[in-house]
Image: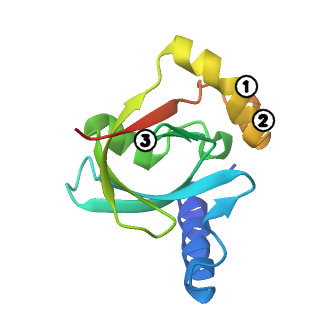
Amino acid sequence: MPGNAFMKALNGSHRILLAATRGRVGWKFGTMTVLEVTTTGRTSGQPRTVLLTSPIARDGEFVLVASKGGYPDHPDWYKNMVAEPRVSVSVAGGPAQPMVARTASADERAAMWPEVVRAYRGYASYQRRTQREIPLVVLSPAI
């Protein structure tokens, strides 16, 4: 299962791809939009930026899947969002927009999970790998 070092290396490789292609490749993963999300580190208070996929994007909102590849622990970016829900989000290398993150309720998650798995069926296998329920995060524009 992927640990923190692997996930950071994967994100770094993704950034190299974006830079090497000047953004022509890397802002989509299948049908999913790739977002550059900046959180506030829950311990450090410093900005932390990560590239994440959004299997559901509509009405100005994005849904993220805190899967960490089925690892037993939540990803750091999710823990940061729980501690400080104000984030900034850049779509396709565009300007960062302020957004607010919240964990989907159980009912919302149940309704969205089939759509999430349709966008990328790997999420279903990640859920089978872990005993934790993988949270879905809804990003909404900050008002």
Position of 136 relative to 105 (above/below): below
**Residue 52 image offset from top left, x and y in percent:** 54, 54
Question: Is residue 141 something that shows in the picture?
Answer: yes
The residue beneath circle 3 is 78
Q: Secondary structure at mark 3?
A: helix
**Residue 134 image offset from top left, x and y in percent:** 59, 30
The residue depicted at 76 percent of the width and 29 percent of the height is 128
Q: Nearer the viewer, mark 1 or mark 3?
A: 1
Amino acid type indicated by mark 3:
Tyr
Q: Mark 3 packing: few (<14 Cα in 10 Å), some, or many (20+)?
A: many
Q: Secondary structure at mark 1?
A: helix
The residue beneath circle 1 is 114
Closer to the chain start, of discs 3 and 2, is 3
Q: Is residue 23 left or right of residue 29?
A: left
Viewer-closest of 126 and 114 = 114
Q: Secondary structure at mark 2?
A: helix
The residue depicted at 74 percent of the width and 41 percent of the height is 119
Closer to the chain start, of discs 1 and 3, is 3
Amino acid type indicated by mark 1:
Pro
